[in-house]
């Protein structure tokens, strides 16, 4: 009798505990004020996390999220103009972790650096996967590139080989490659003779030349037909692949049987891209020979040659397709991101001319007329603060690249089943009002000593196993390009009242809308 009563009592206690958990987590979702959301999440997620082992998974509290339509789920949310901003607005309503349904796929959106860090860094091996998709496979040679390839032993070996080759090239030649491009850019800007111009293409050429010089010891002029063809094609692929016409094919396989001109165009561009890359690699092999030179491709080719060697250890293998896809990864990852960031920087500085003056004065007083070295960054705190503030406000890969759960796991105490798609909303994390005061305001001073800005909460390059492969390349580029530009030029709006739009256009990359600027040489 006593045993029976004890059993019923224990069951009752567990039931009450479970109801309390569901009640509190529901409260945290309804709570729209960000600070309250954070504190209730902190109060609830910790006990949830520690008690979750007591409950069957089906009883774990459901993730909050907006109501979903039958069949479509929340797909309409995903088609919204400026998706990062929309997802951030949803976080104010549903909390810093919520779910969206896209057809039969569940997506979990993470909107704070704390939750993004938990998934990508602390539990990196649980969330290092990439979703496999019909269209993703079509553009990535069946997932054989680094950015879209799923986490596996083969992928790990490929990333390690490319990472090591990139580190070697970075140490040997990156600084001088960027300096050359920065001086070339200076000449291009001088040639404009203070005419109002759109600089986006010049920034793209400069960033692209850094990568093509590293990869093939080759750089281009803006007018080069080869360069226009390459970037025209890569840009078209990125924008077509991000469009709804294409992404519906991943969720609704039946639609693949219908004619789809957007998809046909995408396939045409992919074929064109592959032809251009094969041409570049062949030309490089003929020009330099695989074993020659300190370029990235020479180093990677070395690895593919070793693959023919039966005695080579598997970790050094790189197939022809992997080399081909890696080259595309570096060209796409390394061009539009850096160029978009430079456009954002000039746009913000046009809005805040006194910040531009502050950086110029710092450069003059510290460098005494010299051009900066990357090692000077520790002596130029205001310039670094501006770089960080632009990365915070406009992380150019605002939603990173989707991850997937490789196994059942949890985030913030919520159960996350295997194969769930995880979207790290870096834009949302960088605008989290619980971490950043006046989150939407451009205020570089927050990153100066005592300014309250948190470098830990700044995650423009993602984190963990999928951390941006080009992070160290990008950081040196952002510093040197900005320092050279602001040392030599003053950027002025075309008309005092016509300042660039700061909202931007968000596809895979968050870009500024085109604007024109007058570039006035500084009198040294
Ligand atoms: C301002 C410049 C840049 C920013 C803000 C940026 C940001 C990012 C982000 C957020 C990711 C996704 C991380 C994730 O999935 O969690 C990423 C991935 C990647 N980035 Fe960058 N990136 C930049 C420049 C570059 C450059 C210069 C290169 C090449 C030299 C590059 C190559 C890559 C590659 C290959 C990946 C895929 C990594 C993987 O899936 O393992 N990126 N980047």
Image (spheres, grey):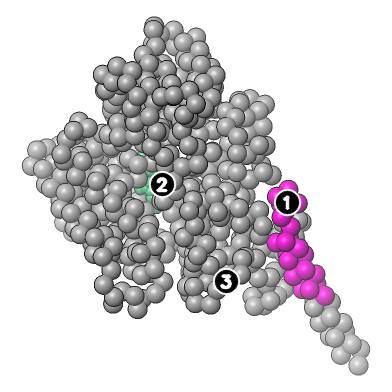
The answer as to whether callout 3 falls within 8 Å of ligand 1 is: no
The structure residue drawn at horizontal position 46% and vertical position 51%, both measured from the top left corner, is: 400
Horizontal side of 472 relative to 454 (left or right) equals left
Residue, far right:
2
Magenta residues span 16-39
In the picture of the structure, the residue carrying the numbered disc 3 is 68
Instruction: Check disc 3 and report its element: helix, strand or loop.
Output: loop
Q: For residue 267, what is the image quadrant?
A: bottom left
Q: In terms of image quarters, where does ligand 1 lie?
A: top left
Instruction: Check disc 2 and report its element: helix, strand or loop.
Output: loop
Q: Which mark is residue 509?
A: 2
In the picture of the structure, the residue carrying the numbered disc 1 is 33
Q: Nearer the viewer, residue 190 or 17?
A: 190
Q: Are marks 2 and 1 in contact (CB under 8 Å)?
A: no
The structure residue drawn at horizontal position 69% and vertical position 44%, both measured from the top left corner, is: 434
Horizontal side of 410 relative to 171 (left or right) equals right
User: In the rendering, at what x and y percent does residue 492 appear?
Assistant: 43, 21
């Amino acid at each position: 009798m006593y045993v029976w009563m004890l059993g019923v009592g224990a069951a009752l206690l567990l039931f009450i505990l479970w109801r309390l958990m569901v009640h509190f987590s529901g409260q945290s979702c309804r709570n729209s004020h960000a600070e309250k959301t954070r504190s209730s999440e902190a109060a609830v997620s910790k006990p949830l996390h520690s008690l979750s082992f007591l409950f069957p998974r089906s009883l774990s509290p459901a993730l909050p999220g907006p109501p979903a339509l039958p069949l479509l789920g929340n797909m309409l949310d995903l088609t919204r103009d400026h998706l990062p901003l929309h997802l951030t607005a949803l976080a104010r309503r549903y909390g810093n972790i919520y779910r969206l349904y896209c057809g039969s796929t569940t997506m979990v959106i993470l909107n704070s650096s704390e939750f993004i860090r938990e998934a990508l860094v602390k539990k990196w091996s649980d969330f290092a996967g990439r979703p496999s998709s019909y269209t993703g496979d079509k553009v990535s040679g069946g997932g054989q590139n680094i950015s879209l390839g799923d986490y596996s032993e083969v992928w790990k070996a490929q990333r390690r080989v490319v990472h090591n080759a990139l580190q070697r090239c970075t140490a040997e030649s990156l600084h001088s490659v960027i300096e050359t491009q920065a001086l070339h850019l200076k000449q291009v800007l001088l040639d404009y003779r203070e005419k109002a111009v759109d600089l986006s293409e010049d920034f793209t050429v400069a960033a692209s030349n850094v990568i093509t010089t590293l990869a093939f010891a080759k750089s281009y002029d803006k007018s080069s037909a080869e360069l226009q063809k390459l970037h025209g094609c890569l840009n078209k692929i990125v924008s077509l692949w991000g469009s709804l016409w294409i992404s519906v094919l991943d969720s609704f396989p039946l639609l693949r049987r219908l004619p789809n001109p957007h998809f046909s165009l995408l396939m045409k561009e992919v074929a064109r891209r592959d032809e251009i890359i094969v041409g570049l690699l062949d030309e490089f092999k003929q020009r330099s020979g695989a074993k020659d030179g300190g370029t990235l491709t020479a180093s990677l080719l070395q690895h593919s040659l070793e693959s023919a060697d039966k005695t080579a250890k598997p970790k050094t293998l790189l197939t022809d397709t992997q080399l081909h896809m890696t080259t595309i990864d570096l060209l796409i990852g390394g061009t539009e991101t850096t160029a978009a960031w430079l456009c954002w920087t000039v746009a913000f500085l046009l809005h805040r001319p006194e910040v531009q003056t502050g950086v110029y004065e710092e450069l003059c007083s510290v460098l005494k007329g010299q051009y900066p070295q990357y090692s000077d960054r520790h002596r130029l705190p205001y310039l670094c603060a501006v770089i960080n503030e632009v990365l915070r406000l406009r992380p150019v890969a605002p939603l990173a690249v989707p991850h997937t759960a490789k196994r059942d796991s949890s985030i913030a105490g919520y159960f996350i089943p295997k194969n769930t798609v995880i979207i790290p909303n870096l834009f949302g994390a960088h605008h989290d009002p619980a971490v950043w005061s006046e989150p939407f305001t451009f205020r570089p001073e927050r990153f100066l000593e005592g300014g309250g800005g948190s470098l830990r909460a700044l995650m423009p390059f993602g984190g963990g196993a999928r951390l941006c492969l080009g992070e160290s390349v990008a950081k040196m580029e952002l510093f040197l390009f900005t320092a050279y530009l602001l040392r030599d030029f003053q950027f002025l709006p075309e008309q005092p009242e016509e300042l660039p739009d700061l909202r931007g256009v968000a596809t895979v990359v968050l870009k500024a809308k085109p604007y024109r600027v007058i570039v006035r040489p500084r009198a040294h």
